[in-house]
Amino acid sequence: MPDRREDESIRTDRPAVPNGAQASAGGGAADDGAALPTVREILALPAIAAGVPEVLSGEGALDARVRWVHVSDSAGVARLLDGGELLLSTGSGWPTDPGELRDFIAGLVDAGLSGLVLELGAHYRYVPAVVEGAARERGLALIALHREVKFVALTEAVHSRIISEQTAALRARDEVRERFTALSLRGSPVDYLVAQLAQTLGAPVVLENLAYEVVAAEVPAGIEQELFANWEQRSRHAHRNRGDWLIVPVEARGIRWGNLIALPGPAHPAGRTGVIEQGAIALALGRLADDGDEWMRAGRQRLVDGLLEGRFAGLPAAAARLTAAGLPVEGATLHGLVVTGVPVTASRADAAAQQFGGRALAAAAPGWPRQTHASIVLLSLPIGAQFADARAREFARAVVDAEASTDHLVLSIGQAASELDGLLGSVQEAIDLARVPGARSQRGLAIRRAEDRPLIRLVTSLRDDHRLLRHSEQMLAPLIEYDLARGGDLLDVLGATLAHPGNRTAAAGASHLSRSVFYQRLTLIGQLLGVDLDDGETLTALHLALLVRRSAVR
């Protein structure tokens, strides 16, 4: 007469592995199978707790996910398993020979069993030592039940939980798919998509291109330095070896542009792989729709903005982030540049720098009118390399579209630096330099250098000094108030005058005013300020005040 447990085995057919429960992607860590309960969680269910469970081996395996419960006393049950099951048994049909019992346990482990629950009393009064020893050797979770339980009630309780959680997982996957589909349809930028992925997963997320350069990242400031130091080597290693990074490709129509990487984080009801795959789909759709430069433009823009606004944990972390984005900082000659007058793309700026063995990172300059086409460029050249005028002109022409003219292009160049702190100062010098009106080059392409403008360098170095700011406000307050109240142009007229000392005709032309109107403005400026605009010291003080104001206003 068959044992009561043996009959139940025919009613424990297992479902297919749920999407994302056991899969891995792109060499990353296996997904967490969040919709499936662990052996530990099952042992806490009232239906099994009533059997007084005792964990005899495999304490570390109690966190294994269980995708189905199988009930069988058969010695050949291993061939019926697909992996991930929890086996309930009385052991009545198990082999009696110790060697065969050891092989039986090994077969269960090889089949991918998540845990073995043996009920004592019906056949075994205690767990055979060979069974316990074999389970301990192979790391199998072995649990003994000291009281009889209804296996039917237990399987119903576990299967009900599995099905309920899988239903919740399906609902969560639908929500994630709808969210990222909506983001892609709205044309959300790449950095925002990456930020949303990180928020959804509760873990750092990095988007890299095929050269293992970081395009966009949402990473806590505290781990930036450690994470991005030697990023290329770390990423290559993660691609080759199965680790705890979850990696999925960003590709569509047979074209692969890069990879999304999620660092370890909490389980997600939709499965971490499912979430990041939806993000990859949204990024791929965006890549198909944009002009091909969006990845570089959006990611670099956020990075440059963060540097200029001081949004980084420290200089070492910021340097590591720049290096991971493809801009070497250590052992390089660094320049901050501002290109005005023509639009500049991130890819063209980088390609132009590579002509000289360097790299460049470009982004729109903050605080400029859109029609000005002002771009900030962080330039990294080989150590000791010179960025002379001839090379600067070649670079400037290379960043312009082949069909565009360089007649209105102005390249403002900060002083050379050898570390990130100096680079930030060089960028600020270039920004201050670009804000100052100046005479156009005869050839149409103007090159400005911070070392040629010592007053601008002084203002940049003292830009936050309260005494300098107070001097600027006291000198210019009447003109500022007049312009604000009447929509006037007195500050612009003063700037043109200071940019063309001794040549009022050129100053009038730069102001786009007739000479008579220009002189009327000058007279008004003198009256409002109560100064003599022909006095050299006064002009120097006004020039300093105006430079400070343009440096401070963003």
Image (cartoon, rainbow, N blue to C red):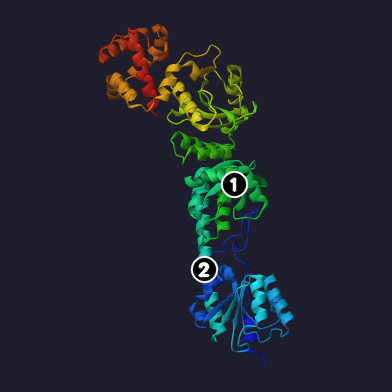
Q: CA distance from mark 2 to mark 1?
A: 30 Å
Q: Dot 1, crowdedness within 10 Å: few (<14), some or many (≥20)?
A: many
549 on left or right of 157: left
389 on left or right of 458: right
Q: Judging from the image, what secondary structure is the residue with disc 2 in?
A: helix
Q: Position of residue 247 (x, y in %)?
A: 61, 52
Q: Position of residue 351 (x, y in %)?
A: 62, 30
Q: Earlier in the sequence, mark 2 or mark 1?
A: 2
What residue is rendered at 51% in x and 55% in y? Answer: 201
Residue under pointer 2: 165
What residue is rendered at 37% in x and 18% in y? Answer: 544
Q: Dot 2, crowdedness within 10 Å: few (<14), some or many (≥20)?
A: some
Q: Which disc number belongs to residue 458?
A: none
Does 523 appear above or below 223?
above
Does 219 appear above or below 407?
below
Q: Judging from the image, what secondary structure is the residue with disc 1 in?
A: helix
Q: Amino acid at mark 1?
A: Ala
Mark 2 vs mark 1: in front: 2
Which quadrant is home to the N terminus? bottom right
Query: In the image shown, does 262 or 517 lie closer to the viewer?
Result: 262
Which quadrant is home to the C terminus? top left
Residue under pointer 1: 284
Query: In the image shown, does 60 or 488 lie closer to the viewer?
Result: 60
Check whether the beta carbons of the residues at disc 2 and disc 1 lie within 8 A of each other: no
Q: Amino acid at mark 2?
A: Glu
- Whether residue 496 is visible here, answered yes or no, is yes
- Whether residue 373 is visible here, answered yes or no, is no
What residue is rendered at 34% in x and 23% in y? Answer: 468
